[in-house]
Image: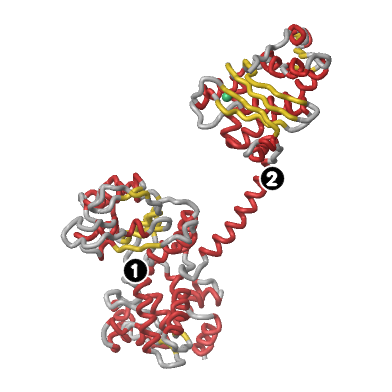
């Protein structure tokens, strides 16, 4: 290999002129500037932070390319009469003069007419690698992006065809020097991929495309949160549903809080369905239902022979839920040893089967649920506080059914549809009195109790008829005592709650000896008086309609 010598560079140095009084610097006819590399480093950092690595690399590569093109035009003008190689190395010489990098040609074979080109150069003191190391430290990939752009722009202009340079070694990756190789783009196996960095690419276009995607995903998400799984319209329900919808777009661990039977598993399923994991498994485990000595093998799996009785190797629930969602109901019931293991899984993202020393990576979203106050069990020492904080990142409270009466009717309708189909029994629905009674009932068993009751009602009601109160509340005692606690308006009154007409009120009315008509007259007059003669207002005070009031006034005065 013959060493390539640079021609004398006085001709190039003479092109540099500092015109301080004009505030200009010139390289022949191109205006230049002296700039702090620290400033370019700040720009680089800013770009990486705002538009990311790919776009930053593209922008800097194209910036270098523009510079290379200018210098090639200059080289072809000032050294056009010199041997081809001397004319060509004007580029490396200018790159040095401009303070970018020290360039040593290692190999150069070129023919402008045929378009053949092979070049290899050593780079030392690269400003770009230097500033990158200072700002970001060691890199996995070469970082001299604008300089590669320059070499490519310079050579492509000089050769009249696209000659792609690649940095095959870079100081930022731990090499002693940066080393670059240039060939026609077609000669590179991954030429296309690298050529991309020389194409203009509008961020704005990408952003608009992304916005379309977000809009699309949002509509599909809304559709999913409206799946019939979750039914309700009360404020408390809507709030919980909204929180679940937001959580589904992330992979945050969710803690569902609420009494037994409020539908925590349904919310967990809805969360799974609305998430990117919907194609993956949904695995539900009730921690309270597992025997204590089997909990760990159930959750984390077991290797054959790990303990007496472990006759076969079995996957645990965590492994089964890999790629999907694991729902741990009544998580407060986990024994302390299992809590410690669960905490480790959440921290490390890996599990270890019982009797196995291998760890397995798992990718799950955990949804935990509890009907007890975990902060209390933490205080009592029955629940690890570190696990509690890990689970309590995104708590969602599902209110009891008695606090969301507005949900009863839509829930009943959805359940009727399901059970009438299941039991092949067409019904007219629930009677108004029944619905009213359901709205008054405290529902200690929440939605699950309502569901059981509706199913029973569907079975007990006559074919094609209505579900009546006695079809539903059969378990609350015999029919008579039940009937007696439903007032004439269909209002369900618990026997412990006194009615509105208290004993003492009735006593005092009866004690006056006033007749029923007189009492009614007095009440009507008082109500009309209190509402300033406004009949509609008076009717409201008495809990009747305006026509009913008018009728009673007329009857009473006649
Ligand atoms: Zn480099």
Disc 1 crowd rating (10 Å Cα; few below 14, some 14-19, many 20+) is some
Q: Is residue 332 above or below residue 2?
A: below
The residue at 31%/85% (across/down) is: 474
Query: Which of the two residues, 535 or 393, is positioned nearer the viewer here?
Result: 393
Q: Position of residue 139 (x, y in %)?
A: 51, 29
Q: Is residue 279 above or below residue 544?
A: above
Query: Which of the two residues, 453 or 76, is positioned nearer the viewer here?
Result: 76
Q: Is residue 138 above or below residue 530?
A: above
Quarter occupied by the N terminus: top right
Q: Earlier in the sequence, mark 2 or mark 1?
A: 2
The residue at 32%/61% (across/down) is: 329
Q: Are marks 2 and 1 in contact (CB under 8 Å)?
A: no
In which quadrant of the rendered view does residue 407 lie? bottom left
Helix, strand or loop for disc 1: loop
User: Left of 63 or right of it: where is 291?
Assistant: left
| Visible residue check, residue 20 | no
User: Left of 207 or right of it: where is 32?
Assistant: right
Residue extending farthest front: 1
Q: Position of residue 241 (x, y in %)?
A: 47, 61
Q: Which mark is residue 261?
A: 1
Residue topped by disc 2: 205
Q: Position of residue 269 (x, y in %)?
A: 43, 64
Q: Is residue 387 above or below residue 33?
A: below
The residue at 46%/54% (across/down) is: 247
In which quadrant of the rendered view does residue 315 lie? bottom left
Quadrant field for ligand 1: top right
| Separation of residues labelled 2 and 1 (CA atoms) | 49 Å
Helix, strand or loop for disc 2: helix
Q: Position of residue 285 (x, y in %)?
A: 32, 62
Q: How many numbered marks, from 0 up?
A: 2
């Amino acid at each position: 290999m013959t060493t390539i010598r640079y021609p004398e560079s006085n001709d190039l140095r003479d092109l540099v002129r500092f015109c301080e009084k004009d505030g200009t610097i010139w390289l022949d006819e191109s205006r230049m500037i002296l700039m702090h590399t620290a400033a370019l480093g700040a720009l680089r950092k800013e770009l990486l932070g705002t538009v990311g690595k790919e776009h930053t690399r593209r922008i800097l590569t194209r910036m270098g390319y523009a510079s290379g093109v200018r210098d090639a035009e200059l080289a072809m003008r000032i050294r056009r009469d010199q041997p081809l190689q001397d004319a060509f190395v004007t580029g490396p010489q200018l790159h040095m003069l401009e303070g970018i990098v020290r360039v040593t040609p290692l190999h150069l074979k070129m023919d402008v007419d045929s378009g053949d080109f092979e070049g290899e150069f050593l780079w030392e003191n690269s400003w770009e690698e230097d500033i990158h190391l200072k700002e970001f430290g060691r890199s996995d990939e070469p970082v001299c992006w604008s300089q590669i752009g320059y070499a490519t722009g310079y050579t492509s202009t000089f050769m009249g065809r696209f000659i792609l340079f690649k940095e095959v070694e870079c100081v930022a990756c731990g090499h002693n020097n940066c080393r670059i190789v240039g060939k026609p783009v077609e000669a590179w196996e991954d030429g296309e991929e690298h050529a991309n960095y020389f194409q203009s690419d509008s961020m704005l276009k990408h952003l608009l495309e992304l916005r379309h995607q977000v809009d699309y995903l949002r509509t599909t998400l809304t559709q999913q949160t409206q799946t019939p799984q979750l039914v309700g319209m009360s404020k408390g329900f809507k709030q919980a549903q909204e929180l679940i919808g937001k959580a589904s777009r992330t992979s945050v661990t969710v803690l569902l809080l609420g009494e037994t039977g409020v539908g925590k598993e349904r919310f967990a399923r809805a969360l799974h369905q609305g998430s990117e994991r919907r194609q993956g498994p949904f695995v539900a485990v009730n921690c309270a239902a597992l025997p204590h000595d089997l909990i760990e093998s159930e959750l984390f799996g077991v290797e054959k022979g790990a303990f007496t009785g472990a006759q076969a190797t079995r996957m645990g629930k965590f492994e089964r839920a890999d790629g999907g969602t694991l729902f741990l109901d009544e998580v407060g019931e986990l024994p302390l040893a299992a809590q410690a293991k669960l905490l480790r899984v959440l921290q490390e993202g890996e599990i270890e089967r019982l009797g196995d020393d291998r760890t397995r990576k798992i990718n799950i979203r955990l949804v935990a649920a509890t009907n007890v106050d975990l902060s209390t069990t933490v205080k009592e020492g029955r629940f690890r506080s570190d696990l509690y904080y890990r689970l309590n990142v995104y708590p969602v409270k599902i209110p009891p059914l008695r606090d969301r009466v507005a949900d009863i009717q839509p829930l009943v309708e959805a359940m009727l549809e399901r059970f009438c189909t299941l039991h092949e029994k067409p019904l007219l629905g629930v009677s108004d009195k029944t619905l009213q009674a359901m709205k008054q009932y405290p529902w200690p068993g929440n939605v699950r109790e309502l569901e059981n009751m509706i199913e029973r009602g569907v079975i007990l009601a006559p074919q094609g008829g209505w579900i009546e109160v006695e079809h539903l509340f059969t378990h609350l005692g015999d029919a008579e005592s039940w009937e007696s606690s439903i007032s004439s308006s269909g209002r369900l009154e618990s026997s412990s709650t006194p009615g509105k007409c208290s004993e003492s009120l009735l006593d005092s009315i009866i004690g006056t000896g006033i007749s029923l008509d007189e009492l009614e007259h007095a009440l009507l007059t008082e109500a009309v008086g209190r509402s300033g003669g406004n009949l509609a207002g008076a009717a409201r005070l008495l809990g009747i309609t305006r026509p009913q009031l008018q009728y009673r006034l007329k009857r009473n005065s006649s």
